[in-house]
Image (tube, helix red, strand yellow):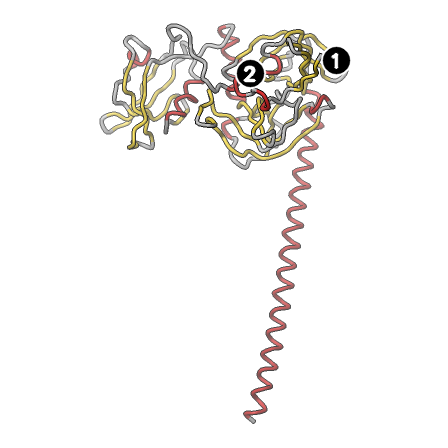
Amino acid sequence: MAMICGPTDNRLTGSKHRVLCSSACVLLVSFFAASHALAQETFSAVAKDVRAIFEKLKDSVVKIESEDSHGRLIGTGFFASPTGTIYTSYHVAGESTNIIAEFGANRYPARRLVADIRSGLAILKVDAITPWIPQGDSDQVSVASGVMILGFPLDQSVAPNYGVVGGLDQGRDNRYFATTLIRANIAAQRGEEGAPLLNLDGQVVGIVIGSVDGRTACYALPIKAAEKVRSDYIRFGGTRQGWVGVDVQETDQSSRDSKVVINRIEDNSPAHIGGLQPGDVLLSIGTVKIHSIPDIRNACFFLTVDQKVPITVFRAGQEVQLDVVPSEQPGSMPVPLYAPGYLLNGESSLRLRIEN
């Protein structure tokens, strides 16, 4: 019996093993099939959203033509209001002449309201009632968010381009931007500089101002920063960055997640009048949390002359909030070495140049 039972058990065990393997294979195939189907469904849903946004907003996107000493430039812009206000890149229309805005069958001469090299933004105006793109909250943009642009690639018809946010960058190559830029993993092409960066609700959250790494990705100025520039123009007739009057340094130790300490305050400066002191650890300026020196640059971008801002510091073991009213800096305000308007040199430009 034992001799008979032994081989029989082995045959039964082998049979069970083959059944289990077959079942596992069936489960794996089913899993990968379900995953593939889900991916296809997700892709189809995103494509449907992109197509719907494109159809809804394409008439609000503008081809910008202008001229400089080297020839004709072509880029993209978009209507930011129903009264003909256009946002585009500084490199498309910040220094050029004979600016034309083309949308649909219409061609309008455009006058330049603002050319801000610090932000990389140019604001234009045409005398027309126009469609426009609603604004979203660029503070809600996060890494891996789905985004798209609408532009005029290679002087062709307006077209969509889709990707995800790859980063929120404060600088590159050991140099800092004037404000945080959105890095979108979208291979923007020449002619698409100045295009709106949109979330998947069809709201503009940024403006394309340059390319990254051989045009495999692009940088966009957050719409919040663009609105700060426009607000200054409406109020002052030009950009007015506020000045507080402190020097800071970064320490090795952190307090409340900040390593930024005030080491000097200008006499009779807004900081001095507002009650800031050397030794204070900066925790926030307005709505911007401070952790390191680059956060200071980003916070200072949004300071406005004569507009009160709350500044929170850590002092003597407790948090203290002070109200400071920035003023104009004595002398001229230095432009950061790596301001967005300086970003697009040589191969980084997404402008399309048609030589004379």
Q: Quadrant of the C terminus?
A: top right
The residue furthest left is 316
Rate crowding at label 2 as few (under 14), some (14 to 19) or many (20 or more) other CA atoms within 10 Å.
Answer: many
Nearest the camera: 40 or 248? 248
Quarter residue 93 falls in = top right
Amino acid type at mark 1 = Asn
Left or right, 211 with reference to 66: left
Residue at point 69%, 13% (across, down): 72
Is residue 141 depicted above or below 337 in this figure?
below
287 lies above or below 253:
above
Q: Position of residue 265 (x, y in %)?
A: 28, 14
Quadrant where the image shows the N terminus: bottom right
Q: Quadrant for residue 46, please give it.
A: top right
Element under disc 1:
strand
Q: Position of residue 122 (x, y in %)?
A: 58, 13
Q: Residues within 10 Å of mark 1 (few under 14, many from 20)?
A: few
| As drawn, 24 above or below 106 | below
Tell me what residue is drawn at x 59 percent, y 17 percent.
89
Which amino acid is tagged 2? Leu
Taking the image as shown, residue 286 lies to the left or right of residue 188, namely left
The residue indicated by pointer 2 is 121
Q: Nearer the viewer, mark 1 or mark 2?
A: 2
Residue, disc 1: 106
